[in-house]
Image (cartoon, rainbow, N blue to C red):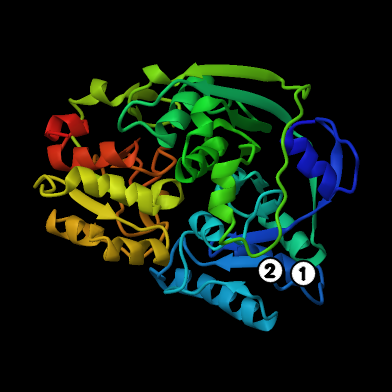
Amino acid sequence: MTITEKILADHAGRKHVSPGDLINAKVNLVLANDITAPIAISEFKKIGAKDVFDRNRIALIPDHFAPQKDIKAAEQCKMLREFSRQYNLDLYFEVGRMGIEHALLPEEGLVVPGDLVIGADSHTCTYGALGAFSTGVGSTDVASAMATGECWFKVPESMKFIYYGKLKKWVGGKDLILYTIGDIGVDGAIYRAMEFTGETIKDLPMHGRLTMCNMAIEAGGKNGIIVPDDITENYVKNRAKRPYKFYASDNDASYTEVKEYDCSGIEPVVACPHLPSNVKFAKELSNITIDQVVIGSCTNGRIEDLRQAAEVIKGKKVNPNVRMIVIPATQRVYMEAVKEGLIEIFVEAEAVVSTPTCGPCLGGHMGILAKGERAIATTNRNFVGRMGHPESEVYLSNPAIAAATAVLGRIGLPEEIGL
């Protein structure tokens, strides 16, 4: 079996599962946010559940429209707060103690290798970077799981993606996943497990792995996953809140498709409007002027991402025709960025820094685009109207390209500003 099949089999109490099997499996963690949890809470009440299955295994995180941007957002966030108090939930994270959900949970050691995690948010697939099976589900499935601790699944087929070769400077996990989506398309892995492997992945730090698995859904994937190794162990050993288990795919496991990529030829990649698969090398887009730069999100808001952006923009100024918004993914990332002097670098460059929030990524707040405006962002989606007006445009890149673009006023490379 593949790693995905092994985790599902164990959580379903079976010795073996195959693609297409319908199973009921026990979940280790159930997740929802201030947009999706209110629906789940309403459904939870409708089914007449008397209590949650485990108050230590339900995470409610207000991050999309939080800090509350308007009355409706305030009412939704209030539902999470009151439900958490009613059932004495351990994993409710209020503003000031929170972060963007998919950055916060791994950071806090609340998702560990071998877990089965469901979340009412499509980017729940992020945690596959730790060697867990994690996937987004609907709010009604979350309601059921909050009551029972179980969820149903159709075992997905698996695709294997093998990456080899040494990465060039300024190329990382964001470029690898955008390049992959550009190759297979936004429907290239529909309801399939995307297993990332190869020598390049073995050398890829955890933040790059989290970025890759985060965007499996942008290829239609059911989940993204990486077999855990020494990098995984070093990441989880001092933060894991529970025991964990390393699973690995068998050598004779079956894959519906295998793709190989020579990463030595991959340069910084940008996804152009209006699909994550519409990718070009950044150097081909130097004629594209930009109005807004966003660095953050569950894709690229970790401390390593902020360090890379700060390295590029240090001692320089944001172009007068551009506004730059930096959003640390969690309070811990924010504090670390303060201690390292990164926030000072951004403010001196005339960027603004926000409290942790999903904010502009989903067109929520903290950076909505007007008609005709263009943004480059380290986020994960660039669909029509994703960040604001339907006639605005969003380009997706890694933090280094985004920071260089902020200085140049157009899409560009760090090399163009002397790096």
What's the mark number on residue 299?
none
Which amino acid, mark 2?
Answer: Ser
The residue singled out by tag 2 in the image is 42
Q: Position of residue 9 (x, y in %)?
A: 84, 42
Q: Position of residue 90 (x, y in %)?
A: 64, 75
Q: Looking at the image, which residue is at 63% across and 82% down?
A: 85
Residue at point 14% right, 30% down? 416
Is 150 or 226 nearer to us in this picture? 226
Residue contact between numbered discs 1 and 2, judged by CB atoms under 8 Å: yes
- Residue 264 in the image: above or below residue 126: above
Give how far across and how far down residue 68 sits, in percent: 41, 71
Picture residue at 49% right of the left edge, 25% below the top: 180
Q: Amino acid at mark 1?
A: Lys
Q: Is residue 382 left or right of residue 234?
A: left
Give the structural element (helix, strand or loop) at label 1: helix
Quarter of the image where the C terminus is located? top left
Q: 53 above or below 295?
A: below
Other residues around mark 2 within 10 Å, as few (<14) / some (14–19) / many (≥20): some
Q: Position of residue 106 (x, y in %)?
A: 55, 56
Q: Around disc 1, counting alpha carbons within 10 Å, would you say few (fewer than 14), some (14 to 19), or many (20 or more)?
A: few
Residue at which label 1 appears: 46
- Res 148 visible: yes
Say if 373 sits above or below 197 in the image.
below
Q: What residue lies at 63% left-to-right and 41% top-to-bottom?
A: 228
**Callout 2: SS:** helix
